[in-house]
Image (cartoon, coloured by chain):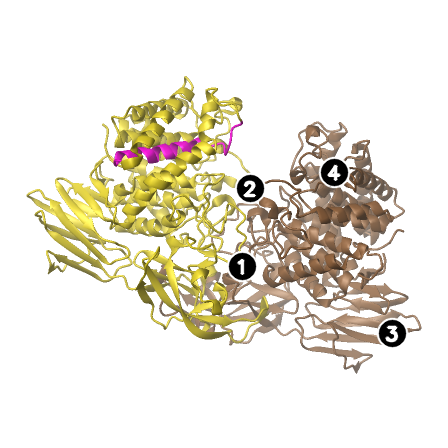
Chain colours: A brown, B yellow
Amino acid sequence: MTNTSGPVAPTPGPLSALQPLPAGAARLGAGGLLGGWQERNATATLPHCIENLDSNGNLANLHRVIGEHDGEFTGFWFADSDVYKTLEAAAWELGRGAGPTAEALRDFLAETAALLEKAQDPDGYLDSYYQVEHRDKQWAELHFSHEMYCAGHLIQAAVAAARSIPGDPGAKQVVTVARRLADLLVERYGPGGLEALDGHPEVETALVELYRLTGHQPYLELARRFVDLRGHGLVGEDRKLGPRYYLDHAPVRSADEVTGHAVRQLYLLAGAVDVAVETGDAELLGATERLWDSALGTKTYLTGGQGSRHRDEAFGDPYELPPDRAYAETCAAIGSFQWAWRLLLATGKPRYADEMERVLYNGIAAATGLDGRSFFYSNPLQLRTGHDGSHEDAPSQRLAWYSCACCPPNLARLMASLHSYVATADDTGLQLHLYAAGSYTAAGHTVEVRTTYPWDEQVTVTVTEAADQPWTLALRVPAWCDDVRLTVNDSPVRAGAQEGYLRLTRTWRAGDRVELTLAMPPRLVAAHPRVDAVRGTVAAVRGPLVYCLEQADVPARHGVLEDLVLDPARPIQVRTADGIVPVVLDLGMRSLTESPALYATYGASPEAGPGSTVPAIPYFLWANRSAGPMRVWIPLAPQDV
Amino acid sequence: MTNTSGPVAPTPGPLSALQPLPAGAARLGAGGLLGGWQERNATATLPHCIENLDSNGNLANLHRVIGEHDGEFTGFWFADSDVYKTLEAAAWELGRGAGPTAEALRDFLAETAALLEKAQDPDGYLDSYYQVEHRDKQWAELHFSHEMYCAGHLIQAAVAAARSIPGDPGAKQVVTVARRLADLLVERYGPGGLEALDGHPEVETALVELYRLTGHQPYLELARRFVDLRGHGLVGEDRKLGPRYYLDHAPVRSADEVTGHAVRQLYLLAGAVDVAVETGDAELLGATERLWDSALGTKTYLTGGQGSRHRDEAFGDPYELPPDRAYAETCAAIGSFQWAWRLLLATGKPRYADEMERVLYNGIAAATGLDGRSFFYSNPLQLRTGHDGSHEDAPSQRLAWYSCACCPPNLARLMASLHSYVATADDTGLQLHLYAAGSYTAAGHTVEVRTTYPWDEQVTVTVTEAADQPWTLALRVPAWCDDVRLTVNDSPVRAGAQEGYLRLTRTWRAGDRVELTLAMPPRLVAAHPRVDAVRGTVAAVRGPLVYCLEQADVPARHGVLEDLVLDPARPIQVRTADGIVPVVLDLGMRSLTESPALYATYGASPEAGPGSTVPAIPYFLWANRSAGPMRVWIPLAPQDV
């Protein structure tokens, strides 16, 4: 029962409102922003990842298992996972054609598949850290080991290969290796086996996907078992990190807030949705939706970033969202995107697509430099004058690689499969959730989307293939948009959004053309008063894009970015520009005349000096021109708070 | 050349403006706040520390070195330092008489001294972590090992014992052990020896103090060497923590800001002042004063707490001072106090005494519960509704002990020697820096201070012993005070403060009485606009005390503390109260009617509801009644920002 599709292919059922498009049914056009990212990923990020797996020793770690390398193990003990994520990215990329990089990717896939098969133990075990000098610790320190985390990423690579290049010999080999490891997990930890959990969730969603690929029920059962066993103290005592870090403090079904290590929390919840959908477990699905409310209501940055704390890479308390020390790990943003995608497919609710859009254009997009070869791991919403950027955990600029390099290949696998997340289908027709130039096909209908969204407000959807029967084209109206206009074949259509979507039902003909206009006036956004860290500030947004100020754009006479305040009465000018920033927002700013004292008796507000215009740029483009200070949340002139 | 005094006994010289009082020349009265803390320390904290050294295995670690214990090493690898700090505290306490606890303390000191002598290697080496199974790593991982850090604390204990109970056999034994270890350090790392540094500064100040005690020049030379070698990359590569963590990124003389691990930074700077004073190195002293400006100007909490980051227990960027995630480690506050004391002695500048007062009454005092047996390690300025207090690094209440228990015995040694920091002497007379009931003697003059400061504004200084010659009594006027009144024998005296001190020069007679009134109207304080984390808020202070709001005092109809805003137009009422809080400040508060959205289009400010009065209590007393939410920085009603 191979389901040829992208990441996440739910079995149709009562908890499966929408279906992803089949493989090949979605293609991004090179002219759009998302298509551009996918292209950059193919030509820069993915080759860069493969090079770094080599130069950083990840592949050598596997070679030393079979005696082909005699150096030390290098990198973190879960370094295999970077190989698997890159393998997954290569598979998705090959599935969409891969163009001039196809041969190199096929070689990488074939060589890596062969290497994995050789490195795998006869019983199916595979983990290069534990297969040489740490044999005695195999399976013995699961709270720490990431053995199942790595297995999960291997399985996801195998699923990607099977879905996107099913006939490829390397793909088949990876699937064989992954199944042997998954079978070992079932044998050891399935019903009747040991009750144990990996400290880092990830294998849950992978096992469900492998079940979807193979129809082999024990994979699903094991995934459900892992989800249900969590929260009962099985991960074991860890006084330093505590059970919340591992999400072992409360079962998913009864947890009342997202907490602990953000990536672990988000991967676990993605897996829980998968389990709920495949087992028809509405209670479990409901629990994940409640946790989503908690995350989005109190613990999510304006950029969609999650996990505010550097310490333990963790979610903070409710409303603890400091912009300068925002950890907002790239992998957490990706995890949030993956979780939201699963919830969208399960429920069809537009809020999940809204969140996918927000985190994609801001929290995720900011992580990759324009060169496609530099990355942020943490994604702060402010960089201060005088920032110490000497630590990997809070650098002033994107770095080419990290000692813990989880993020770059995670970006690569997301970008390589990005076309899969734009549209879905159901019995009524096609739903467009993201607006990206490209073509999308479902049930004999194909639409072609032309747009430079989110730079431009216009989206043109042309039907290029139509079956001769009524069919519904559903167009998402983003929650940020309160001015939508629509024409079909140049005739205005009054179509109110129902539950977040404009639904156009008719017997479509090839050549029919829908023009959607999502008005994008620039807006100022304020945070809930409990978000103490940004009290008295606003952020400028336009459409789905969060904007920021960079020191590079501050006129010299104004000095330091931190001393500028916004005059909210001055209208924001939208200005199209050349160069790397197509659309800037010109903000009316003034400089504060400040006293030097760190603390002083409360009295008159500091004086605000004469005004000036400073352009704000999209947050995701920050630090591409210089490494200077930046801020998303802009202080209001004192009298305007 | 034994100098019988308290902690820090500078050799008189050009960089030694003030001298501490000789041993026995300062005594705190039991009726005052500081005297009460010292008494609580003697009867509760110090016995509690000794019990915990036993129950947590610190003493057992030393017993296993000599085969008297066969369990595992327990606790952190630098667990010996807790023994030494407690030993130092016991020595200071015995020096001031110790009352009913004297016998137990003498037993502890004698037994521990004997144990240390037995545990010490023939060459002088002593470190229970490295003397059993880690022999091969001895001196081999100095960036990590804390071997010299532990040595430093042993030396400080020895100095304390020699100064406060010089005739005690246990004291002599500790001095012998400490000198043997110090001699080993000199041999290995002194001029001509290895160039190496401990990752955690502390030994520098200890070596200078040992030099002051013994007159043995090589100790001073080694301390100077350690200070000068720092900042040249000697600590070695550590990609995760980086050179700033170890203060090895720049020499003290050229560093331009406090940075890295806060306690390490502050201990290093205390040691640098000691070296500067004893070597007459005005350049080095000047460098520490510049760094003090940097710390106080951009990186210090209103409570005097320093080191805002949980991650790496580190100083943040300039103005990065989040109240909720304030790490503000207790040991850093103590380190700041110790640094300021050394700078006060060296320069006589009142700002250092101001800072000692601020951090003592706020950042340090808050760390100990009223029971004297519970402690904060981190000292946040805000605890949120819904705070996850399950981690040791950010608990909701003081804990009895910590897995890294550096703070409780550090508090014990400070409190046991607290009388030493109140007054100093110079050629002209006596200086009172802190106002605490007690008696203080210098050069044949004794004054008795009666006051309930800082609850009350009045300080009565009575001369009880006078030499028949002109003599100057100097009274510090705190920087927060702009209304000082003074009478001598009931006659008003017009005495303007000169450089922060009122100086009364006359031929004093026994019975002369000075009445000092330091007016303490409650005030609201605001932070520099660059402290983004507290924009739009104020803090209530009175005299040296920072106040805070606790949920326990919020009337039920107002709901959650976070939803209250201050009406700054309503006068603050000072109210004396019974119970654990002698003086509360009644603040006019209103509740915000909030919308639930985490982010919304900027527009009208939220409505503030009807007013109410909520009492604020001194910050240092928080979490003594319940573990609920707390905040120092109080949002202003929107129109008052």
Q: Name the residue beneath numbered marker 2.
A: A240
> What type is the residue that disc 1 sits on?
Met
Predominant secondary structure, magenta span: helix
SS state under label 3: loop
Q: Taking B442 as reference, is B380 left or right? A: right
Whether labels 3 and 1 share one chain: yes
Check disc 2 and report its element: helix, strand or loop.
loop
Relative vertical location of residue A224 with respect to residue A455 in this rendering, above or below: above
Question: Pointer 2: residues within 10 angstroms few (<14), some, or many (20+)?
Answer: few
Q: Are marks 2 and 1 on the same chain?
A: yes
Q: Find the distance from the CA under tag 3 to the CA under tag 1.
A: 46 Å
Q: Which residues are magenta?
A: B72-97
Same chain under badges 2 and 3? The reply is yes
**Residue corresponding to mark 4:** A194
Mark 4 → mark 3, Cα distance in angstroms: 60 Å
SS label for mark 1: strand
**Mark in front: 2 vs 3:** 2
Give me the C-alpha separation between circle 4 and circle 1: 50 Å
Question: Mark 4, chain letter?
Answer: A
Mark whose residue sits in front, 2 or 1: 2
* Residue at image location 11% in from the left, 58% down from the top: B490
Q: Would you say the residues marked 2 and 1 are in contact, meaning their CB atoms lie under 8 Å apart?
A: no
Type of the residue with mark 3? Gly
Q: Judge whether residue A417 can be spotted in this image.
A: no
Amino acid beneath label 4: Leu
Residue B354 locus on image (x, y percent) = 29, 52
Mark 4, mark 3: which one is toward the viewer? 4
Q: Which residue is denoted by mark 1 in the rendering?
A: A630
What residue sits right under mark 3 in the picture? A511
